[in-house]
Amino acid sequence: MKRSPSGIAPPFAIQKGVPEALYRQVYDGYRKAIVDGSLRAGQRVPSTRVLAIELGISRMPVLSAYAQLLAEGYFESRVGSGTVVSRSLPERAAPAVAAVHDRRAVSVAAVHDRRAGSATAVYDRRSFQEKGRRSQTAATAATAGRRVSERCRNLTNQEGFFRSRRAGPFVVSQIAFEDFPLAAWNSLVTRHSRNAQARSLDYGDPLGLKDLREAIAAYVRTARGVRCEEHQIVIVSGSQQGLELTTRVLLDPGDRVWMEEPGYRFARGVFAFSGCAVVPVRVDAEGLNVADGAEKCGAARAVLVTPSHQYPLGVTMSASRRLQLLDWAESNASWIIEDDYDSEFRYEGMPVTSLQGLDRNSRVVYIGTFSKVLFPSLRLGYVVVPEDLVERFLAVRFALDIGPPTLPQAVLADFIAEGHFARHIRRMRSVYGERRSALIENLRRRLGSRVEITGAEAGMHLSALLKGISDRELVAGAARRNLWLVPLSPFYMGKAARLGFVLGFGSTPLEEIPAAVHTLAGLLDSNSGSDVT
Amino acid sequence: MKRSPSGIAPPFAIQKGVPEALYRQVYDGYRKAIVDGSLRAGQRVPSTRVLAIELGISRMPVLSAYAQLLAEGYFESRVGSGTVVSRSLPERAAPAVAAVHDRRAVSVAAVHDRRAGSATAVYDRRSFQEKGRRSQTAATAATAGRRVSERCRNLTNQEGFFRSRRAGPFVVSQIAFEDFPLAAWNSLVTRHSRNAQARSLDYGDPLGLKDLREAIAAYVRTARGVRCEEHQIVIVSGSQQGLELTTRVLLDPGDRVWMEEPGYRFARGVFAFSGCAVVPVRVDAEGLNVADGAEKCGAARAVLVTPSHQYPLGVTMSASRRLQLLDWAESNASWIIEDDYDSEFRYEGMPVTSLQGLDRNSRVVYIGTFSKVLFPSLRLGYVVVPEDLVERFLAVRFALDIGPPTLPQAVLADFIAEGHFARHIRRMRSVYGERRSALIENLRRRLGSRVEITGAEAGMHLSALLKGISDRELVAGAARRNLWLVPLSPFYMGKAARLGFVLGFGSTPLEEIPAAVHTLAGLLDSNSGSDVT
C-alpha cells in the first residue's frame, strides 16, 4: 500500500493551560499560516495522527480543526494524496509586500521569552538608535542601494551567460552529451549507491577520496607527464574552485599576478576578490611572452598559464618559453599556476606534456578538471600541489567548504579504474576530431583568407580571427539565428589586439556544421560595412 | 564477453622520418616512463591495437615492442586483465627525490619548439635572474619555508580533526547513520541517474535546481517561519560555503563582525580570510548579548548568530534579544547572518521560529544545511537571501565555483517532495530524543551537581559545563578510552569563561550511553587533582 506523502508541520505554539480550546488553537495556527503565506496552495499538511503526536495532544482537537478547515475551504482532501492546502485559494503576495503587520505582533508567541528579565547588560534601544543613525548616514551615503561589499561590485555579470544556458552551434564549454557513456556511468552510480555504508555518509577526507586521488595521480603521471604522488592531489569542484584555493594559499591582497592577454575571463574575478592586481602579459605564437611579463612586472608573485592549449587563442607554449617561465619563477620565488583544462583531446602535432612535469623546483601548481573530459554538472576537478604545500592546501580546502561530496568521487574512481575513462577519451578524441576537421574545412571554404584559425590542434574550441568586424556587436544577431558566438575582444583586458570568435565544436553535431558556418558567413557579410569598435 | 580494462597511453613522441625503428621508439618510451616513475607497477597499458591507432602507426612495431617489454619483465600479461606494468618491479622513489636529470634533458622532445625563433621580445635569462634574485631576497627573507600567503597562516590546523575522522561516543556533528532511509534515497538516486539526459550533464543554474529551491522554500516557510520565495534560495555545498558566500557579498577587508563568544570555530577562518575583524560578543542565558556588542563595537557591519540553538552552549535566543538585534541591524544598516544548522530537532519548550521570519527590513541572511538532518557527505546546504541581494549573490556564487552539482540536487528535491524528508525528521526526532534523555539522565546520576547541562532542548549535542577541570588536556586520555570529547574552552576567543565539553549524541547508540558516561566520570575523577589551565 502506498502511504500518502507526508507534509511538514508548521511550528504551532499550542498552550495547554489557556481557556482557548486546543482545536481552536490548531485552526487559528493553520489559518494564520495560510493567510500570511507560510503555507501555500497545494502544499501537503501532516495527517491528523502525525500532528497530534507532534503537538503532544490527543487526536480529537486536531480532527475537529481539520474538519473545520476543510469545511471552510482552507484545506482540501484527495484520496491517496492526503490533505493539502486548498488549490483554489488566491495566490498570496510575496512576503515583503504582504508585511503589513507590526512586527512586534507577529510570531512573538513562537519565541520563548521567559528569561527576558535576566539580562545582565541592559539594551537601551533609543540611545542606541540615535548613535546608529549617525553611523548609518556615513556608511550608506556613498551608495545608492543598501551597502554590500565593495569587492563584489567588481564582478561583471558574466554569470547571466550561464543562467540562460544556450544550446546550439558554436557554444563553448559544452560537450557531446549524447556520446557520454551514461549506461556505464549510471551502473556505477547504482552500484555505489546500493553499497553505501555509514562511513560513506560521514564527512570524508577534505582532500578527497583516496581511491580517486590514486586514480588521478596515475592518470596525470601517465598521460600528462605530471610528477606527483597521490597525497599531492586535492579534489575540488572544478577549475574555478581549484584556482580559488590556489590563490588563497599562495597570494595576499596587493600581490601582482601575470595573466595571459587575452586570457580566461572568469579567473579575473578570483584574483579581484583576493585583492590581487592582474598584470596582462602578451600571448604570441609561442604562448605567454615571458620577456613581456618580466618587463612589465618582473616581481609578480605568480602567473596563471594555459600552456597546453592557451585559452582562448589555443596556442601551445613552446619549449623555450616553458623553460624561461620556470627560470623566472625559480629566480623570483614566484609560483606558476598551470590550468590544463582540456589537453585530453589533441589532434595533431607532437604530444604535449605538462609544464609541471618539466619543473624541478616544485614551483608549479597544476589544475585539472573533469568538466570537459566527462561532464560539467559533475563538479569535480583536482589540483596537484607541491609536496611542501600539502598541509597549507589542506587547511584552506577545509576552510573553503569542508570537502567534496563522497558519491561522485567513488563513482569516478571506479570509472577510471575500470578503464571507462581511457576508452571515453579515445572515443571522444575521434568524435571531436571529426567535428573539428569539418569546422576548419567549412570555415576555410566559406571565408577563405578573411579568417585566420588558431588553436585547432587540441580541445573543443578554436579561435576564428577576423579583421574589421565588431565581434561584440554581432553576438545578439547571431543568437537570433541560433548561433552562439563568444566574441574574442572581451578576453583582452587592454586594447583588443585581435577580433573574432571563440567557436566551440564540442556539442555541435557534424551534420550541422556546414549550415552553421553558412549562417556565420552570411552574418559577417551583412556586417562588413559596419563600424569597428 | 568482458572486455579487458583499458589503460591510458603515455604521451609518446613518435617520429616517423628518423632512422630509429618505430618499435624501438615505443620500447624506449615505455621503458623511460617506467624508470622515471610515470608508469607504476600494476598499472594497465593500452592494448597494442589501441596504441597503434593512437600513434598512427601500424600494429607490427607495437607488437614487437610489447613482446620485448614482456620478455624483459617490464610488462606482464594476465588473461582477462590485459597487459600491465610488471608488479615485481621495485617501487620507484618519489619524483622529487628521483629528480636527478638535468631538466633540460628531460621531456623536451615532448614539447614542440618549432617557432622558437619567432619571439618578438627576447628573454635575457641572465640579466633577469640577477634582477630576480634581488627581489627574492627581499621577498623571502622574513619567512622560513617557501613564501605562501600570509592570510593562510592564520588558519589553525583544526582540519586534522576531520581528516582522522573518529567514530565513538560523544563525537560531534555525526548523525545516526544506521537510521538514514538509504533504500528510499538510493531508489531516487537510481531513478535520476537512469533518467539522466543531456541537459542534466550540462552546467546548471549557479543558484541551484529550481525544483530543489522550491522544495526548500516551502520547507523553511512552513517549518521555520522563514519569509521567502524560491528565487531567494541559493544552493551551496553546506553552511561553510554559505558563510563564505555571504561574507563575500556583504563584507570587505577591515570590516568588523560580531561573533558569539563562545562561538563556531570554523567561522573564524572565513572571516579571517576576508580580512574581517571578529568582535567576540558575550552569550548569556538569553543568547547573544546585544548590549555587550553595542558597547564593544556598535558600528559592526554584520553579526553571525545561531539563535535557534546557540553553538556550542545551545541556548535559544530570547524574543527581546531578537528584537534588539533586529533594531540594532536596522539602525546601523548592518547585516545579520543567521546560521540555523540543526533546529529541525527540538525536544522541549515552545517551537522556535527563525530570526529571519521576525525581520521586516530584509536585514537577515539565513543559512541552512542538510549535513545534520540528512548526511554530511551529501554536501548540500542553502542560503535564503534578501530580495535586493539576489543578483549579487548570483555573481559571487558563480565566481566561487560556478555552481552546485546536479544529481544530488535532483535526488534531494524528490526526497522532499515525496514526503521522505518530513518522515525522516519525525523519526529522527524520536531517535535523538531518546539518546538525549539517556545522556542527560546518566550525566546527572553519575556527576550530580558537578555538571551543568546546557543546550539540550534541541539538536544533536549538549554542553556539559564542569568546573575545575582542564578540558583541553583531558581529550587525549579520553580518546585512548574511545571517548571523543570536544573541549569547550577553544570556542572562546578571549579568556574562557566556561570549561567543559560539547557532547554529541547523534551517532552514539542508546545502549552505549551509560558505559560512555561511566568512562567519562572515571576520567574526571582521575583528573580532579590536576591543575586548571
Image (tube, coloured by chain):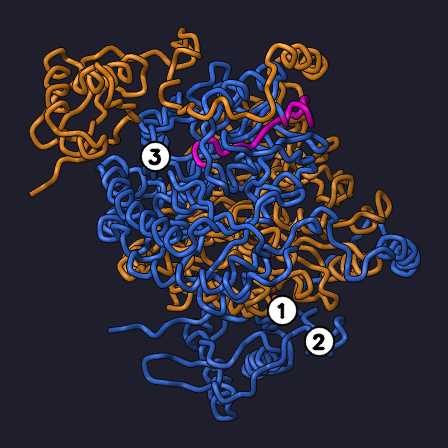
Chain colours: A blue, B orange
Q: Identify whether A14 is placed above or below B255.
A: below
Residues indicated by labels 1 and 3 sit on the same polypeptide chain: no
Q: Residues within 10 Å of mark 1 (few under 14, many from 20)?
A: many
The answer for how far apart the CA atoms under marks 3 and 2 are is 51 Å
Q: Amino acid at mark 2?
A: Ala
Query: For this view, does B33 lie left or right of residue A327?
Result: left
* Residue A407 seen from this side: no
Which residue is pictured at 32% across the width and 80% down the height? A80
Q: Identify whether B30 is placed above or below B451.
A: above
Query: On residue B227, which mark appears?
Result: 1
Which residue is pictured at 28% across the width and 26% down the height? B10
x, y percentage for residue B212? 46, 63
Viewer-side label of 1, 3: 3
Identify which residue, B501 or A131, lies in the foreground: A131
Residue contact between numbered discs 1 and 2, judged by CB atoms under 8 Å:
yes
Query: For this view, does B60 lie left or right of residue A117?
Result: left
Query: On residue A212, which mark appears?
Result: 3
- The residue that mark 2 highlights is A99
Identify which residue, B223 or B72, lies in the foreground: B72
The answer for how far apart the CA atoms under marks 1 and 3 are is 41 Å
| Range covered by the magenta-colored residues | A292-309
